[in-house]
Amino acid sequence: MTDTHSTAPSLPFHRGDAPLDPPAALAEWRAEGPIRRVTVANGNTAWLVTRYDEMREVLGDPRMSSDVTKPGFPSPRAEEPKVSLGNFTQMDPPRYGVVRRTLTRTFMVKNIERLRPRMVEMTNDLLDAMEKMPRPVDLHAHFARPLPSHIICEVLGIPHADRALFQANAATIGDMSKTEGVAFSARTGIAEYLVQFVEEKDRNPGDDMLSDLVVNRMRTGELSKEEIAGMAALLVINGHESSASMIGLSVITLLRHPEQLHRFVTEPEVVPGAIEELLRYLSIVHVGLRRVATADVEIGGVTVRKGEGLIIPIHSANRDPDAFDAPDQFDITRESRHHMAFGHGLHQCIAQYMARVELQIALPALFHRFPDLRLAAPLEEISFREDNVVYSVHGLPVTW
């Protein structure tokens, strides 16, 4: 839609007194119908898809484009989005498939499993450091954020000492109160650093993802150094914010359900299923996935015209009672693997197995190390990040 004076309601972001639940309006709208118009940041309108089945339909439809440069794309910011080189999440086939395939080997299960012992070691190192700190400790600052940072730097072959650059820029990129220009500058800052690092890998390749891409993709002419740097920047940004958010919010959720936490800690066999339930229950993509139609498409009985934008709030899909029984209840014994926390279809998250392994390692290790871990402030005093692409906390004070 292109009207700039619409009376359609704005996409809700405020979660009120239930910070671990999606905004209440999404449940109300889901009950009313599978699709409706909402006003987006630039004052235009787009279609908001509200139900699980229709979201899967949209995300699996090749007539739905992820290209942010197409007219009608519903950017989460008021300004026109700027294209980041190598950001394959903003690409459509056939180029999308070419670029994504270059990363497939890195995120194969066997390669992530090979990294598992090192991930355990990095987890324990951070817990060792936490144990020596005066309490309360900010779990977000000293565990949830640095652990994914260490891991993605390990995968890419980047020195951990440089993670501060990535953390600061990743936080800026996700902050919806920043302009598109500021966010683009932060993305560019990471990419420019990584271009230099790609050049160094070309001179001295090692046993890491960047070296593999340089030797097998850049030297063959399949990818440019700028594209490799842009792809790596995307992984760094997502690796910082998404996993950090999931660790912090998962700790809060488990602490609020002590009987289920006890099973999580004492019954290792329930951990994989519990992680899936945490992913479903929390669904941290706060602004929704975004698409624009490249042809007229019928969704939920409504004709979406070519050039009209769509927003897919997966936190609404994962609380849809038609997809999950008692969806607002947290239950680590439920079968949750059909959740859409990692998206669906062509653009489903390529690093999802690594994200699962991070959580499977980090959360049990944390609660085993500190069996009486607890929040050092009431939930209502915890500051949640509602102005961010990824829903998270500003800080998480804990003690034991």
Image (cartoon, rainbow, N blue to C red):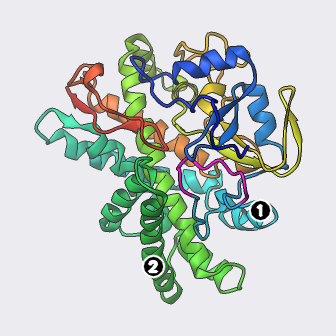
Q: Position of residue 48 (x, y in %)?
A: 68, 33
Quadrant for residue 197, please give it: bottom left
The reply, left or right, for residue 389 in relation to residue 2 is left
SS label for mark 1: helix
User: Which quadrant does the N terminus fall into?
Assistant: top right
Q: Residue furthest front?
A: 5
Q: Which mark is residue 355?
A: none
Q: Real-space Cα distance between discs 1 and 2?
A: 25 Å
Which amino acid type is shown beneath numbered disc 1? Answer: Gly
SS label for mark 2: helix
Q: Earlier in the sequence, mark 1 or mark 2?
A: 1
The reply, left or right, for residue 156 in relation to residue 300 is left
Quadrant for residue 105, please give it: bottom right
Which amino acid type is shown beneath numbered disc 2? Answer: Phe
Q: Position of residue 392 (x, y in %)?
A: 40, 37
Quadrant for residue 324, please give it: top right
Q: Is residue 229 visible to the viewer in this orientation of the structure? A: yes
Would you name the residue on which mark 2 appears?
Answer: 197
Q: Residue at x 52, y 24 (%)?
A: 22
In the rendered image, the vertical position of residue 349 relative to residue 39, given as above or below: below
